[in-house]
Amino acid sequence: MAQVRIETEIAATPEEVREIILDFARYSEWHSTFIQNINTIPPGKNSRKLLQGETLNAKIRGVKLVPIVKSNSSTELSWYGSTMGGAFSGKHYFQFIESHVTPGGTTFVHGEDYDGWMTWMFGKGIFGIKRSGVVRMYDGFSKDVKARAEEMKKLKDGIAKTQSDPWVKL
């Protein structure tokens, strides 16, 4: 098995970061490279209410997938997907952990545990010919999540300030 795991510190609460991840319809507003789209089945189902065993429609780097939800809790969203006859399979996950580094923030963990028969391509070492590209994609997505979460947090905090003091200068 090969694993890719990226940890990113975000100055927003785990709930706020989770909300961004679950808002599939708005991904195109803040991310345009790795995950092209994710849709619930049936379309329009509330992603916050996804249950283990339900499926999604996803397009990731041009590849269409129908992954199965493994977990959807306050601390993790994960799914299991497979393509090309099981060559590339794995559990993809997003974790929202209360940060011990960023006060009031989140340690956002984005990763995948690969188990398909072509897994060696994502492993460490000389045979992991695709690993660096995958790490860059996951890191880029995580940076986009961080930027979006921190931008939304500033907006939310700014609105709260103006509601308590309409003369405050933002």
Image (cartoon, rainbow, N blue to C red):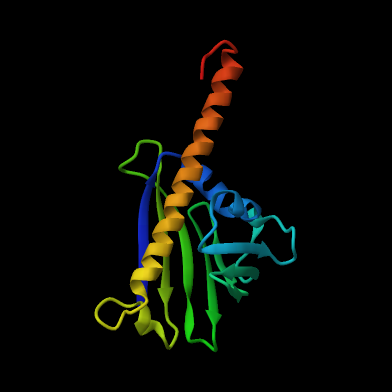
On screen, residue 120 above or below 52 = below
On screen, residue 110 above or below 74 = below
The percent coordinates of residue 157 (x first, y second) are 52, 28
The percent coordinates of residue 145 (x first, y second) are 48, 50
The percent coordinates of residue 34 (x first, y second) are 50, 63
Q: Residue at x 58, y 18 (%)?
A: 162
Counting every numbered tag in the picture gives: 0
Asked whether 165 or 26 is in front, the reply is 26
**From this viewpoint, is residue 1 visible?**
no
On screen, residue 92 above or below 73 = below
Q: Residue at x 43, y 69 (%)?
A: 112
**From this viewpoint, is residue 118 visible?**
yes
Asked whether 30 or 82 is in front, the reply is 30
Q: Residue at x 37, y 66 (%)?
A: 135
Q: Residue at x 43, y 54 (%)?
A: 142
Please state if 145 lies on the left or on the right of 127 as rendered: right
Asked whether 124 or 51 is in front, the reply is 124
**For residue 56, what is the image quadrant?**
bottom right
On screen, residue 68 above or below 166 = below
Which residue sits furthest left? 125
Please state if 166 lies on the left or on the right of 91 as rendered: right
Rendered-image quadrant of the N terminus: bottom left
